[in-house]
Amino acid sequence: GVGNTESWNGSSWTEIADLNNGKKQINGAGSQTAAYAYAGYPGNTGEYFDGTAWTEIAELSTTRWTAAGAGTLSSAFCAGGDSDPGNVATTEEFSWSSTLKTGAWASGGNLPNPASTNTGFGPGTAGVHAGGELSGSSNAEAFHYDGSSWTAGGNINTNRNVLGGYGTQTSGAIVGGHHPSPPTVVQNVHETYDGSSWTEAGDLNTGRAYFG
């Protein structure tokens, strides 16, 4: 993996401070001046970014990559993902101390099924997990998270993995991805979510997968 970090100003990207631990298939939360990067391959490290430099802080209990992760700096989650060996179902919940500039991970309840290459969005106490790979096949399931446990949400219309996601539990969306089984089909599908059902709207011009 690589450690490069780039900042977006609305029109262009500028390379700034690099991560201390280069990796791939990583998750992130926060803003340009108060961010947290975590999980990914290799290792279970987490790093805090203050707008200038990265500092290694809390490590996850379970090493994982291609996980569903989202949230804010004060409340993030990391669910599922690949590990060694196999996929994991566990969730970890991150809490942040603005005074001490550090945080900690705690157990947050298991997903109903171990999934990887999934996506997540929303804050750590009201998150969504959607899609991914389950037992070698692309997955249509979506689940809601309340900070301690997962409950079933509405299934997505086009099952896929390595997709992107954004928004909140009642106003979110997923985009792109692909089916893992040959022949691989890269998706341009964009689906919005109202908290109970998904609706296809405003598809991408170019299908793509492996979102940041």
Image: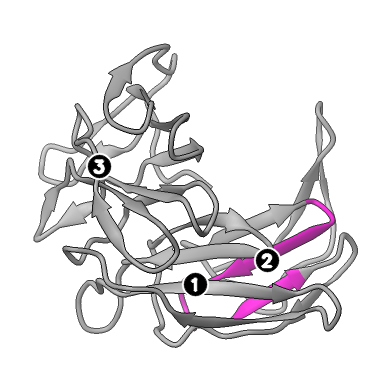
Q: How crowded is mark 1: few (under 14 residues within 10 Å), some or many (20 or more)?
A: many
Q: Establish if 149 lies above or below 46.
A: above
Residue 120 spot, x, y in % from top left = 42, 50
Q: Quadrant of the N terminus?
A: bottom right
**Marks 2 and 3: CB-CB under 8 Å?**
no
Mark sitting earlier along the chain (2/3): 2
Q: Residues within 10 Å of mark 2 (few under 14, many from 20)?
A: many
Under mark 2, the amino acid is Tyr
> Which labelled disc corresponds to residue 112?
none
Under mark 3, the amino acid is Gly
Residue 41 shown in magenta: yes
Q: Where does label 1 land, which residue?
A: 93
Residue 53 shown in magenta: no
> Which labelled disc corresponds to residue 153?
3
Q: Where does label 2 land, which residue?
A: 36
Q: For mark 3, give the secondary structure.
A: loop
199 displayed left or right of 183? right
Residue 186 spot, x, y in % from top left = 28, 31
Under mark 1, the amino acid is Glu
Residue 146 spot, x, y in % from top left = 41, 58
Work out how far the residue at label 2 is from the one at label 3, CA to CA, in angstroms: 27 Å
Residue range highlighted in magenta: 32-48
